[in-house]
Amino acid sequence: MGNSISYISGRHRFLADAHGDTNTSVRFQEDIGAQDSKAFASRVLPPERNEKPVKLSLRPSAKRLYREASDVFLKRKADAQLDPFTIKRVKFYELPPHARTSIWSLPVEILSAIASLLEVRDLHSLTQVSSLLKEIAGPLFFANRNFSTSPQDTCYLRVDSPNFDVLMTWRRMNTFRPPRMLLCWIDVDVQPAQLSIFLHFLQSVPRKFVRFITLFWSFDILASLIFPQIINFLENVRASGCEELTCMAFCYETSSSSVSGLTKIHAHPNSNGLKCFDASSRVFFSPQLLPFTMQTIQSSSLEKLALRRVGLSATHWDRLLRYLSMPMLIELLVDSDCAPGTLIRFLARHPNVKNLRITPRPAVSWRIPRATPSTVLSMSVLEGPLTHVLAILRQHRKPPFLECLEISLQSGDASPDYMTAILRCLELCDSIGYLALRLPTHSHRSEMMCDPGARCAVPVIHLGISHHSTEASPWLSAGSAGDPLALSAPWIGAFPKIKRVSMQGESSSTAADLAQSIHSFVADDVQVSVQLQNNPW
């Protein structure tokens, strides 16, 4: 019984007919016994007394039983040699002595061929029958649902809401390995049962195994008929033990953002293990979801907070950042609607912030605030519009060494030209590892780009210049006139200690022409890289 493989011998009873032919087994044993007696006589009696050998003749029913018993033996022998990563811990059961052989005696290859003829719903039911059929039908079920279960794909798993039910089937497989990252797309027709299945899957996985969870959706969840279930879904995902929760909406949202009633929202500190919270949607500061947002921020020891495209006004940003206190915060991402002065006051209360990224918006511009008493900051990465970058660099009591400084230029920054404005920022730094300059999308004139005699005294190791237009522009077919990348090539001459130059984006010039122009301003040992859309060099 069990996994043991029975030894097939003529002295053992074989399977009988299911129609009640019990005499078949008896007659078969008599034939075998007659053969054994003659074999015994050939070994014991003298040769002259040996009878003439008799050829064994089996009845058809006995032959069929012998063939079926042999198939069971060969099948088990073949299953024992299968790849251990495909079918493991499959328990076989011996049939009763008087039972007809059933589907379990078929080879695994035939069972797989039968399962391949089933529909997706039937395959899902078949995985719940037994361990053997689960391992046979599971891969076919996953293939029909476009669900990859390879170790490379399941480490960072992408799944949409219609396939949430696949997760529980995968969870019961012997080859299951907990994913480290889940990227989930929630459809507009998502059902409460699908959300419950996803939460049940998270609860079945050992806590803290899934470290990163990213949720995407393309509909207004505030107008959804199951909005209460969505809120409960978000709260349970937050409490699942993940370290990083990212929520992004890819739709036009008409909800109004507000931060009123912050003092009325209470949270239990350190009630979850979140270290990063990224909210990129206006709905998170709507009256319906504001309690969830603030409880997530206040109940976590966040090291990274990203609030992008949340639709807050400058007044709302000031009220929010004045209220927040996050002593463990290291990285902050906000919209450019947040005033430079608001950010400076927040950084003064959070000196451990090393990375600050400000998402620019073309329609938003700020006047550079007047100088205020300097503070001790430990900034190493600073990205944002020129007005924000310049204001924050002025607050450093000591010129910082920046690993990365990214400046997004706006049309109003050409005063008197872009390079002069850039050098005003650089002179406030000690040294820069990587300087990234993002050019505006509108057309340009040569006098807006650079002062020919400008020179930067601050060491810059790597200079990157990029330009990406939002729509077709006239300069794309007008040669170098109005071409931002071609006009910015002389900027490289302002950095005499540079070791590497890279350009990427859109240009009316070819990559070879831009590379040749760059080489005319730099030494021979400087690495040059130009990557243009549809024309890499």
Image (spheres, helix red, strand yellow):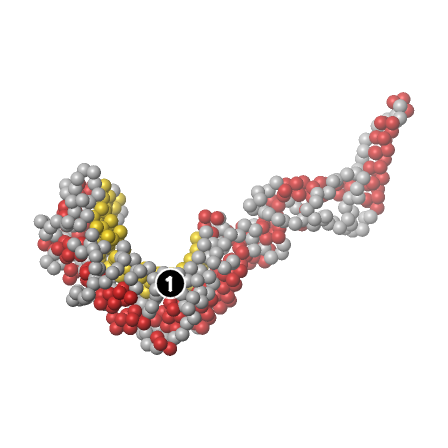
| Residue at (22, 67) in percent of width and height | 341
The image quadrant where one finds the C terminus is top left
| Residue at (18, 54) in percent of width and height | 426
User: Label 1 neighbourhood size at 10 Å, few (<14), some (14-19), many (20+)?
Assistant: many
Q: Is residue 506 above or below residue 269?
A: above
| Residue at (21, 41) in percent of width and height | 526
Q: Is residue 85 above or below residue 49?
A: below
Q: In the image, residue 308 lies at what x, y percent?
A: 31, 64
Q: Which amino acid is tagged 1?
A: Leu
Residue 37, image quadrant:
top right
Q: In the image, residue 11 lies at what x, y percent?
A: 81, 39
Depth check: give the residue in front, 86 or 211: 211
The residue singled out by tag 1 in the image is 302
| Residue at (43, 70) in percent of width and height | 268
Q: How many numbered marks, from 0 up?
A: 1
Q: In the image, residue 212 lies at what x, y percent?
A: 42, 58
| Left-right relation of 460 to 152 | left
Q: Is residue 510 above or below residue 323?
A: above
Q: In the image, residue 16 lies at what x, y percent?
A: 78, 47
| Left-right relation of 482 to 79 | left
